[in-house]
Image (spheres, rainbow, N blue to C red):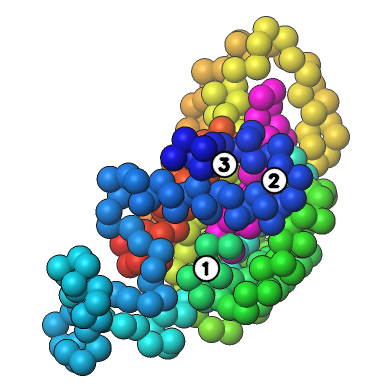
Amino acid sequence: MKESRKYLEPTTVAQLQNIELKARLVVEGFITGLHKSPYHGFSVEFSEHRSYRSGDEIRHIDWKVYARSNKFYVKQFEEETNLRSMIVLDSSASMNFASAGNISKFEYGSYLAAAMAFLMMKQRDAAGLATYDTEVRKFMHPRSKQSYIAELIKVLDTTKPSNGTGTANALNDIAERLKRRGLVIIISDFFDDLDSVVTALKHFRHQNHEVIVFQTLDPRELDFKFGFTSDFIDLETGEEISTQPFQIQKAYQDAMNEFTNSIRKECFNLKIDYHLIDTSQTFDIALKEYLKKRQGGG
């Protein structure tokens, strides 16, 4: 178990050469962890079975599964199993930030996106991908064909964070392009005007999409522990300042807490799942939240 779980560590995964291998090993480590952990409510077998519910036809019960587990499961049909998911990844320049000992927010987000897409394909669900900075740069409609994962991963592997941030405009554009309801997963630092972003999130909810937000930040962006004197460069504007972080650390932390709490509150009001993750955390944290949503536990 330790061998497989090491591939849930961001810095370990970053050392691998191939992003498809990264995604596969993250998912394998995740599934191994589920099978050997207290998370018995999770399953990655949705595409074949679900628990028996009152009203289901007896003839659909899988008696072989009952013999092994002493629980009633029914075989699912294709139309019951397919979920359409759109993974939206912020590729603006601010996502390129990485503090010492951590991978960049974009790297973390791209590995997470690849692993989620890999997991979706494993479940025979449809996965799509959109990347954006000031505007949508790539838009790939959700598909469930197994070979599609290579196309999605190629986009993630060749995308380089650049330009400013236009989260609100991009999300509105993506919402307009999604013609069928499904699950929208957004991975971003959300460094944009909050009111505009909230309006864009409402756009998805008005179209009856389920939405999960992963606000992805570097640990130092949360605690501002940069040492005695540091130079700061705005990755989007190039503006530079030199300051002593400890003098403003408390004020910064208060402002950041207010920022993240505001997004959390707005998401709660919109019935959107919000999760704050940092780039030092293992990937299974976000994958578990996806599975909860996938199985109706969100």
Classify 20 as above or below 219: below
Question: Residue visible at 56% across and 32% down?
Answer: 280
- The image shows residue 174 at horizontal and vertical percentages of 65, 71
The residue that mark 1 highlights is: 122
- The CA distance from mark 1 to mark 3 is 18 Å
The residue under label 1 is which amino acid type? Answer: Lys
Q: Residue furthest right?
A: 238
- The image shows residue 190 at horizontal and vertical percentages of 61, 48
* Left-right relation of 110 to 54: right
Asked if labels 3 and 1 touch by Cβ distance under 8 angstroms, the answer is no
The residue that mark 2 highlights is: 106
Looking at the rendering, the stretch of residues picked out in magenta corresponds to 97-117
Using the image as rendered, state which of residue 22 and residue 232 is in the foreground.
22
- The image shows residue 194 at horizontal and vertical percentages of 57, 50
Is residue 90 visible to the viewer in this orientation of the structure? Answer: no
**Residue 100 location, quadrant:** top right
> Which of marks 3 and 1 precedes in the sequence?
3
Describe the element under mark 3 as helix, strand or loop. helix
